[in-house]
Structure formats: C-alpha cells, structure tokens
C-alpha cells in the first residue's frame, strides 16, 4: 500500500493514523468497486420476477382445474383470459407494490407485506373490473388462483432469502461497511454484525473521534479516519455502507451535511440512533412546526392485534394437536418404555404479566434430575443464568432424540390452547430466572412466552445471556403477525438442523 493511502503518524491530518499491516482487508477491497460487489442484485431480482410469474402460472392452471373439470368445455372466456394474463398482471402488481426494490429485499418482513398488498390490490381490481364490465368470471377460479399465487410467491421468496443467507454466511455477496461513532458504540455494533454474517455486512474499518495518545481501533478494528473524514474514506476504499452511531460531534446539521456528501458516492447511509434499539419500526416521522420529529408509537400488544394473535395461536394449536395426535401417542409410549417415571414433565414457568402457569413437556430426563443440579453445577455450560450441559448425564436415550428435534416441546400446544402461551414469543422463564431479570429483561413479560421464538431460530442454548435479552426484547418491540409467520417458517429449519439443542 502506498504512503498516500495511509498517512503517517506525523501527518498533519488529525485522524488516528493506521499502519499498513492493520489494513490488509481494506486494501484488498480497493478497486473491487461497489458496482462489482452489487452486481449480483440484478440477477437476483430478475430471478424473483421469473419465479413470481411461474408461481402465478401454476396458480392459474390450478384454479382452472379446480373450477372446471378437464372433461368439460364450459370454461368461460373471461376466466380463460384472466388465467392467461395472470402471470403478467401478477408481476405488474408486484411492481406497483414496489416489492422488487432493494430497500425491501434481503431482510425484514416488509417484502412479504408488499406481496400481500399486491395480492389484495389485484383481488380488488379483478372484482371491480368484472363487476363494472359484467364479465362472467368464475368466482371459484379467483378464490383458488389468487390465494395460491400469493402462497407460492411467499414460499419461493423465502427460499431465495434462505439461499442468500447461506451464501453470505460463506462470505459471498457481502457489502463493505464503515462504522462511524465513538469507540464503545463501534465495538458493540461490530460485535453484533459479526454474530450475524448472513446479513451481509462486512466491517472493514471505522471512523472515530481523534484522541491524543489513542492507539488502534476498538477490538483491533482498523481506524481509517476521523469523524470529519468519512466521505474521504468512503471514496478511498469504495465503501458500500456507512453506519453512523450516536455521537455529540454528529448532530443534526452534521448528519445532514454527511448525507448530502454521501449522495455523491454509491454508499448507503444507515443511522443507528439510540432510540432505534428500543423502538425499531415503531418510529414514525411526524412533521411538527416545520420540523421532522420522530414519534415512538406504542407496541401493538393490545386491541385487535392481540385478539388476532390469540385467535391464530389457539386455532393453530388445536389443528396441530389433531394432526399430531398419532405422533404424540408414539412419543409417549417411547418415553414410558425407555425409563421409569411419568410421560409428561410439568414445571412452573412465568408467563405474561408475571403470572405463573404449569408448562408441559415430554419427560426427557431421569426423575431425580432436579436433585442432581447442585452436583453438576461445577460443569455448567450455560450462559450464567440458565443451567445447560451439552452432554447432560440426566438425559435419557429417548430424551436425547426428543431434544435434538425439539419434540419434547410438543405438549406445550396444550398450554397454547389453554391461553398460557403463544406459538411465537420469548422463551418461558423459570421463577428463579425472573428473580435475576433486570429492567430490560422484564420487558419480555408483557407478552406471552412462546413455543418458538427468535431465540429458537438464532441458536437456542448456544446464545449468551446478553443475546437472549436482546432477542426477547427485540421481539416484544417489533411484534407483528408477519414476524410470527417468518419465525415459524425459520423454526422448521432450526429444528431440522438441531443447532444449539441440548
């Protein structure tokens, strides 16, 4: 690397100089270019368009077959025209709903919300046009085709996301990221991004306030400049994303100027104000007296949203109990044959608003497991609050299989049916754990605990206590039915892989 790229320690510029051996990654990325690193996005979106059309075609064919028997010739002209046009109209509706824009792809539930919006828009359009022009469109065809197109589209888009996450976890399709702010905030954000490589943010350096005598960046991260040199660093190393953390030096005016200057580059600007960790999507911009103020809305935990969640939970639990009844019987017999003791294990847990309830599980341990905890405390592999052992001698042979695939949790469907738990929510804590809760962790008690949750799809027992707190609070603050659906979908993969299950 040339001396011009990295100023020497005696340079007149006031940022923290960094020797060349501290910047091998940033140097390798020079010249690669933001455009080259984002080249995969175009083909990805084109594949989405193609598969959306395929899903609509399959749904149209299924709708015709469901409504009109192959031996009949009574297919209405209007239905046939709509079936042939559905793939193009479906894609056009997705374009109108802006479901192909980068800002809504890759992560978060917004992409799926826009698919639902496009489906509702198209359904309303078909109904209005057929009524206004008095077209003989078979209602049975519409009732089958549009919901099926929506379901297939959601499935294929989630499959694309899963594929992208796997690629990113292997180091592909990454975007270089520059962290800007004070050292403590930069270190915390870098650690969080490092824990989730499948999100695609590859931190290559940071810009921090210059301090006399300071050496090196937080956690060994290369310091590429000061807070007033962000744009120069972005241009020098062709950075894709700039993440700015709260800093007194970067007030409203400074951030506004930084945004204007970054518009001349290809870098995206991400702001991480301290309130976003608490509120996330509940933040809304509200114009007041000519100012754009941030309003923090209340979480959707009451009223119609709560009724919808509870209805969904209890209906789903009842259906799953009926469908899985043979499996539950087989598991119960296996538990009884494998070791002495009851089939079900009943334990007091803490639910919403601190109320306790008996939680049911298939017994996976010896009957004297609780008495052996003190003896095994010295080899505890938990996170400081939870007691866990990867090779717990108390677990039975059948119990190991049940835990590996979370089958021991199935009796909690009864808890959901009783109203003690939800399908998705924070992990149900023990009373002894609640006694150790801080203010943040107590926030999880405003909702019902769940059979699965962000903790289930993010590592389960491998999580640290800090990660468990963050995920549980994140769920409470960001709850929506779409988030529940996404977590349920990811739970299937987490259970199959069995990562963190012991």
Image: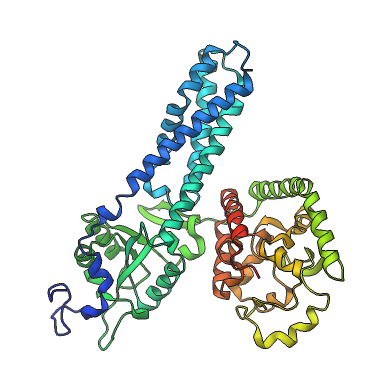
**Residue at point 43%, 51% (across, down):** 106
**Residue at point 49%, 52% (across, down):** 162
Q: Residue 60 at x, y = what percent? A: 53, 26
- Does residue 343 appear in this view? no
**Residue at point 46%, 65% (across, down):** 196
Q: Quadrant of residue 198?
A: bottom left
Q: Residue 116 at x, y = what percent? A: 52, 39
Q: Quarter of the image containing the C terminus?
A: bottom right
Could you say which is closer to the camera, residue 250 or residue 392? 392
Q: Quarter of the image containing the N terminus?
A: bottom left
Q: Is residue 307 above or below residue 268?
A: above
**Residue at point 42%, 67% (across, down):** 193
Q: Quadrant of residue 50?
A: top left
Q: How is the image coloured?
A: rainbow
Using residue 329 as the reference point, say whether residue 440 is left or right of it.
left
Q: Quadrant of residue 26?
A: bottom left
Q: Is residue 275 above or below residue 108?
A: below
Using residue 332 as the reference point, say whether residue 471 is left or right of it.
left
Could you say which is closer to the camera, residue 65 or residue 398? 398
* Count of number-bearing discs: 0
Residue occupying the far right of the picture: 341
Q: Residue 476 at x, y = what percent? A: 59, 60
Could you say which is closer to the camera, residue 340 or residue 384? 340
Q: Residue 14 at x, y = what percent? A: 19, 79
Q: Is residue 400 above or below residue 260?
A: below
Using residue 35 as the reference point, say whether residue 281 is left or right of it.
right
- Does residue 73 appear in this view? yes
Using residue 466 as the reference point, say whether residue 391 is left or right of it.
right
């Amino acid at each position: 690397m040339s001396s011009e790229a990295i100023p020497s320690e005696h340079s007149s510029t006031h940022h923290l100089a960094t020797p060349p051996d501290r910047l091998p990654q940033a140097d390798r990325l020079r010249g690669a270019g933001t455009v080259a690193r984002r080249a995969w996005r175009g083909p990805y979106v084109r594949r989405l368009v193609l598969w959306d059309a395929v899903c609509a075609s399959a749904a149209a064919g299924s709708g015709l077959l469901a409504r009109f028997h192959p031996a009949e010739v009574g297919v209405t002209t209007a239905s046939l025209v709509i079936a042939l046009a559905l793939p193009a109209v479906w894609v056009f509706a997705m374009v109108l709903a802006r479901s192909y824009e980068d800002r809504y792809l890759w992560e978060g539930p917004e992409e799926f919300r826009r698919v639902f919006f496009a489906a509702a828009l198209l359904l309303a359009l078909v109904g209005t046009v057929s009524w206004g022009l008095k077209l003989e469109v078979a209602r049975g065809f519409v009732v089958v085709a549009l919901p099926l197109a929506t379901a297939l589209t959601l499935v294929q888009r989630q499959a694309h996301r899963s594929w992208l996450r796997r690629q990113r976890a292997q180091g592909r399709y990454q975007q270089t990221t520059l962290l800007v702010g004070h050292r403590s905030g930069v270190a915390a954000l870098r650690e969080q991004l490092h824990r989730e490589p499948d999100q695609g943010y590859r931190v290559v350096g940071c810009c921090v306030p210059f301090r006399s005598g300071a050496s090196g960046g937080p956690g060994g991260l290369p310091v590429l400049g000061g807070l007033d040199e962000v744009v120069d660093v972005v241009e020098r190393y062709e950075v894709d994303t700039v993440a700015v953390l709260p800093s007194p030096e970067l007030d409203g005016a400074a951030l506004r100027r930084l945004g204007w200057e970054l518009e001349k580059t290809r870098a995206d600007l991400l702001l991480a104000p301290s309130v976003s960790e608490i509120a996330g999507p509940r933040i809304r911009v509200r114009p007041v007296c000519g100012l754009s103020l941030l309003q923090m809305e209340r979480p959707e935990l009451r009223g119609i949203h709560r009724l919808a969640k509870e209805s969904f939970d209890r209906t789903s639990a009842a259906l799953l109990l009926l469908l899985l009844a043979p499996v539950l019987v087989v598991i119960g017999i296996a538990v009884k044959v494998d070791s002495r003791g009851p089939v079900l294990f009943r334990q007091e847990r803490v639910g919403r608003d601190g109320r306790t309830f008996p939680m049911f599980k298939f017994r996976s341990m010896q009957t004297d497991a609780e008495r052996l905890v003190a003896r095994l405390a010295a080899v505890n592999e938990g996170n400081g609050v939870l007691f866990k052992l990867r090779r717990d001698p108390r677990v039975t042979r059948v119990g190991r299989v049940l835990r590996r695939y979370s089958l021991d949790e199935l009796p909690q469907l009864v808890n959901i049916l009783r109203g003690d738990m939800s399908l998705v929510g924070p992990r149900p804590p023990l009373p002894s754990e609640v006694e150790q809760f801080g203010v943040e962790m107590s926030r999880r008690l405003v909702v019902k605990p769940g059979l699965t949750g962000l903790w289930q799809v993010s590592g389960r027992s491998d999580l640290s206590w800090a990660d468990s707190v963050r995920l549980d609070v994140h769920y409470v603050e960001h709850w929506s039915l779409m988030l529940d659906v996404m977590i349920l979908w990811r739970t299937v993969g987490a259970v199959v892989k069995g990562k963190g299950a012991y």
